[in-house]
Image (spheres, helix red, strand yellow):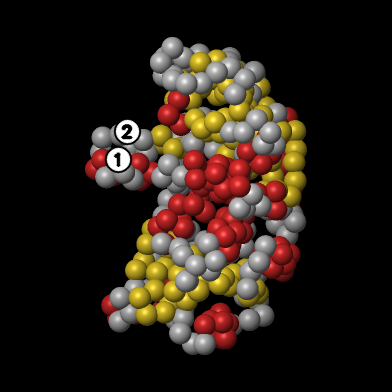
């Protein structure tokens, strides 16, 4: 089979590998479509501290069952499935309290172990979820990024009563926007790329904020009558923006959910947290959110097709990564087709 391998930072190749054997509790998935995520790009550029090389990247992928292990449960050859890339130990503190996505020995396919940019993948049956047979493969590959939207909604206790700010109108920011509008919230969204803000407007944003031309605090005062945002999602990984989100933008009893993962130290004042009884909430990956997202797709509650801007055959993965680097104003989600 063919595999897309980041051999070293900056070097990507399509190589021949053996089709993997499966264990009794695993299934073999024939990959049909896979999405390129920002974290894949970071691994390609050598900017992900968790990745080792060589690495088959890709954690957003879907396909059909090609083989079923003897103890893999109720799966049949030919069924359409999507794979949750989160692999946990099941017995550490985080796992015991139902938060396996922050397991102490967490592994993510495509980061810590080989992922989905290959023609066949062996995966544990408990990571696999069945899909409707009529769901297009490109759409199926977006279940994982939409699971991030489901996770952050859960972590932030998102409701229709909230006035929300989303910092960052990339694919994840636009997914969070769709989830927030689905739940009935009023939403403002911040970015520097006008094309992404226009897409946000199409998807129902109540206010778009171009950080190049508009002061964020002024926008908050206009949008919330000076009361502040009840719920803020920081998805830019910009420490200065996060500091502003904590210091200047929340309402009383507000929540700030942090998706970005810069290692830069953050200057904040305790009084800004204590005085509002502010909650600063971390979020990572997803915690068994795939069934919820699949239900959204079945019901048409969200529009995954709106974040897909380009497709490439998987053999041209190098060209796809280069295109993403060179066209940030045009690219939201690239799907590799197998």
182 sits left or right of 15 in the view: left
Instruction: Work out whether residue 204 or residue 32 is closer to the camera in this orientation and state it.
Output: 204
Q: Are marks 1 and 2 in contact (CB under 8 Å)?
A: yes
On the image, the x and y values in percent for residue 118 come to 62, 27
Instruction: Give the mark nearer the N terminus: 1 vs 2.
Output: 2
Q: Is residue 52 visible?
A: no
Instruction: Work out whether residue 144 or residue 117 is closer to the camera in this orientation and state it.
Output: 144
On the image, the x and y values in percent for residue 73 come to 44, 20
Q: Which residue is mark 2?
A: 89
Q: Which residue is mark 1?
A: 95
Q: Which mark is residue 188?
A: none
What residue lies at 51% left-to-right and 16% top-to-bottom?
A: 68
What residue lies at 39% left-to-right and 74% top-to-bottom?
A: 254
Q: Residue furthest front?
A: 299
What residue lies at 69% left-to-right and 68% top-to-bottom?
A: 201
Q: How many other residues sit within 10 Å of disc 1, few (<14), some (14-19) or many (≥20)?
A: some
């Amino acid at each position: 089979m063919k595999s897309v391998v980041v051999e070293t930072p900056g070097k990507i190749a399509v190589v021949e590998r053996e089709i993997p054997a499966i264990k009794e509790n695993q299934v073999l998935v024939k990959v049909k479509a896979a999405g390129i995520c920002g974290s894949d790009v970071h691994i390609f550029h050598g900017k992900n501290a968790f990745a080792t090389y060589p690495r088959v990247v890709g954690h957003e992928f879907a396909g059909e069952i090609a083989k079923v292990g003897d103890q893999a449960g109720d799966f049949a050859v030919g069924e359409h499935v999507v794979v949750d890339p989160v692999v946990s130990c099941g017995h550490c503190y985080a796992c015991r309290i139902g938060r396996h996505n922050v397991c102490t020995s967490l592994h993510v396919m495509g980061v810590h172990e080989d992922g989905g940019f290959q023609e066949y993948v062996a995966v544990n049956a408990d990571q696999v979820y069945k899909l409707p047979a009529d769901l297009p493969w490109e759409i199926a590959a977006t279940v994982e990024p939409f699971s991030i939207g489901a996770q952050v909604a859960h972590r932030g206790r998102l409701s229709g009563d909230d006035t929300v700010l989303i910092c960052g109108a990339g694919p994840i920011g636009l997914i969070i926007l769709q989830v927030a509008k689905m739940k009935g919230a009023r939403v403002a969204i911040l970015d520097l790329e006008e094309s992404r803000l226009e897409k946000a407007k199409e998807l129902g944003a109540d206010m778009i904020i171009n950080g190049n031309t508009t002061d964020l605090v002024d926008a908050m005062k206009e949008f919330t009558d000076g009361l502040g945002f009840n719920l803020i999602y920081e998805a830019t990984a910009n420490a200065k923006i996060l500091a502003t989100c904590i210091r200047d933008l929340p309402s009383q009893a507000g929540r700030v959910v942090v998706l970005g993962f810069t290692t830069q130290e953050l200057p904040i004042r305790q009084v800004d947290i204590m005085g509002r009884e502010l909650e600063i909430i971390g979020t990572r990956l997803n915690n068994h959110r795939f069934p919820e997202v699949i239900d959204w797709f079945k019901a048409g509650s969200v529009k995954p097709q709106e974040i897909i801007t380009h497709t490439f055959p998987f053999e041209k993965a190098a060209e796809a990564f280069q295109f993403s680097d060179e066209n940030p104003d045009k690219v939201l989600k690239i799907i590799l087709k197998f």
